[in-house]
Image (tube, coloured by chain):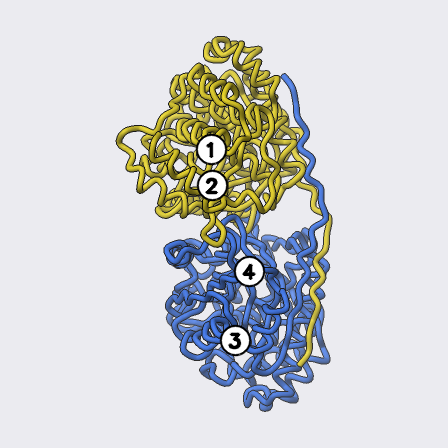
Chain colours: A yellow, B blue
C-alpha cells in the first residue's frame, strides 16, 4: 500500500470589469480588439428569440465587420428554456459549426441568457471564456455579479450549474426601453430586495423616484444599475462560494422560488420574488425583526413599482408549502429564510437561519393565509 | 457611463491524496468517519451495471452500517453511457431521492464512471465534493490524476465537461482480478504510453515483466499503479489547465480518439490508443525523432501486451482522416500531434506541435496505409 499526495494549491484571479452605460456595442468590439479575450477569433453569440432581432443580430454584424468569426445560437425566450436540453442544443449547434476550445461565448440578453450561456461556457471544451452583454434590468440586478450560472430541472430551479466568472459584463441601459413593461417591473423586485437588505437610503430614493424609474429616465436607471452592482458586489466579494454571507441575497427567494415553480412560470422571476419578499417581511414582522411601519413601507414600495404582493388565487397553498422543502437551500430537511432586520439590514446569517419548528409553522401560516 | 471592478483573486487548494492498495473499502469508510468530506452524511454512490454487484453494493452497505445515508445510482456499463443523457438521468434520480447540496458523490468504477460522476459532482448544486474509488487499471492510469471530467457527444469525445478535483482517489488493485482480460489489456495502453513519453526504465521494466503484469501479480500491479500516478502527476503538477505541457499526455490520442469514434466504440479506449501510439510512433520515425529499433520496440511492447497495433479492416480510412479534424485539440483547422522523441521523452510542446502541411500529409499517408 502506498499513498500519493497531489498538491494543487494555486492563486486564481477571476477578476473582471462591469461597464454600465448607453449603447455599448462599439465599446464591446473595441475591447475585443484590444485583447479582452486574448487572440480568440471565434465568437459564439448566444441569445434568445426576443433579443436576437433587437440586439444580437447587430452585434454579430459588428463582430464580422471587425474580421471575427461570429455565429448566432438562438433559443426560445423565457425561463422555460433554461434547461439541460437547451444547453445541449446550443452545444450541438456549436460543435456542428466547428466550434472547439478556441472560442469565446458572448451572451446577449437577460438573466436566462446569461445564466445559460455562462453554464455552456463553463463546460464547453472544459471551459471557454465568456462575456455578458446584459439587456435587462434583472440581468443588471441579479446576473451581472456573482458568477452563478445554472439551468432548471423538473424538480428544482437553478440546481444544475456552476460558478463561472465572465471576462467582462456590459450593462447597456439603452436596451431597457425595448423591454415589455412587465419585464422592467419584474426586474425591480431584485432592486427593491437589494434596498431592503443593505441600503436604507436607496430604499428612500426608490420611494421618492419610482416614477422616474418606471419611465426609464436615464439618470435613475444608471443609479439603479450602479447600486445593484455595488450591493451584490459587496456581498459576493466577502463570500464568493456562497458558504454563508451570500445567502442574504436570497431574501424573498425561499418563498419566491417556490411560487415561481408552482405557478409553472406564469409568474416572472421578479414577480415571484416580490411576493416572496412580502411573505418574508411578514415573517420578519411576526418574529419581531421589523416594525409595523417598516413592514408596510416594504409592501407599499413593491406596490408602487406595480409588483404583485399577494399569492395568486390559482396557486395551491399546500403544494407551495411542500415545494419549499425541495429548495436547494434545504439542509437536513430544514427550511432556511433570510430575515429582514428593519430596512437596509438582515438578521445576521448563521446556523440560526434554519427555521425552528415554530418559525416554520409561522411561515406556513403566513403562506396559507396570503 | 461608469465601470465597476470585480476583484476575485484568491488562493485555491485542490490538493488530494491517492491511495494505492488491496481492498480499500474499509479504509474508505474510516476516512469518511475521520472527516474526509467534513460533516456530510449523504452519499450518492455512482456506478455502472457491471461494478454494481461486484463492489458498489457492498460499499453502499458499509456506508449504511456506518450510519450514513447512501443510495446507488447505476447506469449501463460502457463508453456509450458517457453522455449528457446519462448525466441527466443520474441528476434526476438524485433529485428525486432528495439529494441537494449537502451530499458527496462517490464514484465506484472505471474511467467512464469516474469521468461521469466527477462531472455530475461539478454541476450538481453548482458543485458538491466527490471521491473516486477506481476499480480498473485504466482508471488508475488515466482517470486518477488530473481532474478531467467529461462526457461524449455525437460529434466529439470528452468535449463537454470540466476540471474538477476529487477529495481523494482510491486505487484498489484487488479489483483488477474481476476485470475481463480485454479490459486489463486495454488499460495497459495508457501505461505503455506513460513509459514511452516519460520513463525509459519503466519501458524496460514492462518489456521484462509483461507476463507478471498480465497475470496481475500484486507487486507488478502496485508498481504499475504507482508509476502511472507518478508520471501523470509530474505532468499535471506542472500544468493543471492543459495550456501546454499537459498535452504530452495526448501521445497516441490524436489518432486514437478518432479511431475510437469511427469504430463506434467497438474498440475500447486503450485499444484505440494503442493503434494511435503506433501511428504516432511511425510519424515520429518518419520525422526523424525515433530510431528504427525504438519504433520497433514500441510496437513490440504493445504486441507483448496483446494490444492491437493495426487499424481494423472495417474502419474507413478516409472517414478516419476526416475525423482527425473534429478533434478538440484542433485549432484554426490545424492538426496537433504529440511526437515521441526516442523512448521516454517527447518533442517539447510548443506552437510547433501543430502539424505543418507536410507533416499532415505524412500522417495521412501513414493512416491510409496502416
Q: Which residue is mark 1?
A: A283
- Mark 2 belongs to which subunit? A
**Callout 2–callout 1 Cβ contact below 8 Å:** yes
Q: Is residue B183 visible?
A: yes
**Looking at the image, residue A24 lies above or below residue A152:** above
Q: Are marks 4 and 3 on the same chain?
A: yes
Q: Which residue is mark 3?
A: B135
Question: Which residue appears farthest toward the left when viewing the image?
Answer: A314
Q: Give A171 or A340, whichever is nearer the viewer.
A: A340
- In space, the residues marked 2 and 1 are separated at their CA atoms by 8 Å
- Mark 1 belongs to which subunit? A
**Looking at the image, residue B341 lies above or below residue A349:** below
Residue count near mark 2 (Cα–Cα under 10 Å), binned few <14, some 14–19, many ≥20: some
Sooner in the amino-acid sequence: mark 4 or mark 3: 4
- In space, the residues marked 4 and 3 are separated at their CA atoms by 24 Å
Q: Can you give x and y, in whole percent of width and height, for residue B240 in the image?
A: 67, 56
Q: Which residue is mark 4?
A: B40
Of badges 1 and 3, nearer the viewer stands 1
Q: Can you give x and y, in whole percent of width and height, for residue A167 in the image?
A: 61, 36
Q: Can you give x and y, in whole percent of width and height, for residue A100 in the image?
A: 52, 47
- In space, the residues marked 4 and 1 are separated at their CA atoms by 30 Å
Amino acid at each position: 500500500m502506498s499513498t500519493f499526495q497531489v498538491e494543487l494549491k494555486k492563486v486564481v484571479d477571476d477578476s473582471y470589469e462591469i461597464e454600465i452605460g448607453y449603447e455599448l456595442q462599439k465599446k464591446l468590439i473595441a475591447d475585443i480588439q484590444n485583447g479582452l479575450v486574448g487572440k480568440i477569433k471565434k465568437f459564439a453569440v448566444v441569445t434568445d428569440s426576443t433579443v436576437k432581432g433587437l440586439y444580437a443580430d447587430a452585434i454579430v454584424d459588428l463582430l464580422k465587420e471587425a474580421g471575427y468569426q461570429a455565429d448566432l445560437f438562438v433559443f426560445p425566450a423565457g425561463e422555460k428554456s433554461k434547461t439541460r436540453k437547451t444547453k445541449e442544443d446550443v452545444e450541438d449547434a456549436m460543435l456542428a459549426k466547428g466550434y472547439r476550445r478556441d472560442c469565446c461565448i458572448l451572451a446577449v440578453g437577460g438573466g436566462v441568457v446569461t445564466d445559460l450561456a455562462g453554464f455552456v461556457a463553463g463546460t464547453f471544451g472544459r471551459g471557454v471564456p465568456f462575456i455578458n452583454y446584459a439587456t435587462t434590468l434583472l440581468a443588471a440586478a441579479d446576473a451581472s455579479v456573482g458568477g452563478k450560472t445554472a439551468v432548471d430541472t423538473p424538480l428544482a430551479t437553478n440546481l444544475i450549474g456552476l460558478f463561472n466568472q465572465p471576462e467582462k459584463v456590459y450593462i447597456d441601459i439603452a436596451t431597457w426601453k425595448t423591454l415589455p413593461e412587465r419585464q422592467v417591473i419584474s426586474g425591480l423586485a431584485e432592486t427593491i430586495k437589494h434596498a431592503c437588505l443593505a441600503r436604507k437610503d436607496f430604499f428612500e430614493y426608490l420611494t421618492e423616484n419610482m416614477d422616474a424609474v418606471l419611465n426609464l429616465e436615464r439618470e435613475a436607471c444608471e443609479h439603479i444599475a450602479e447600486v445593484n452592482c455595488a450591493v451584490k458586489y459587496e456581498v459576493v466579494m466577502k463570500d464568493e462560494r456562497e458558504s454563508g454571507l451570500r445567502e442574504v441575497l436570497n431574501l424573498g427567494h425561499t418563498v419566491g422560488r417556490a411560487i415561481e415553480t408552482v405557478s409553472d412560470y406564469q409568474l416572472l422571476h421578479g414577480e415571484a420574488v416580490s411576493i416572496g419578499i412580502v411573505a418574508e417581511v411578514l415573517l420578519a414582522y411576526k418574529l419581531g425583526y421589523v416594525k409595523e411601519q417598516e413592514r408596510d413601507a416594504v409592501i407599499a414600495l413593491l406596490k408602487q413599482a406595480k409588483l404583485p404582493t399577494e399569492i395568486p388565487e390559482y396557486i395551491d397553498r399546500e403544494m407551495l408549502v411542500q415545494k419549499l422543502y425541495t429548495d436547494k437551500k434545504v439542509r437536513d430537511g430544514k427550511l432556511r429564510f433570510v430575515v429582514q432586520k428593519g430596512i437596509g439590514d438582515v438578521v445576521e446569517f448563521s446556523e440560526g437561519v434554519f427555521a425552528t419548528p415554530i418559525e416554520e409553522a409561522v411561515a406556513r401560516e403566513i403562506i396559507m393565509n396570503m
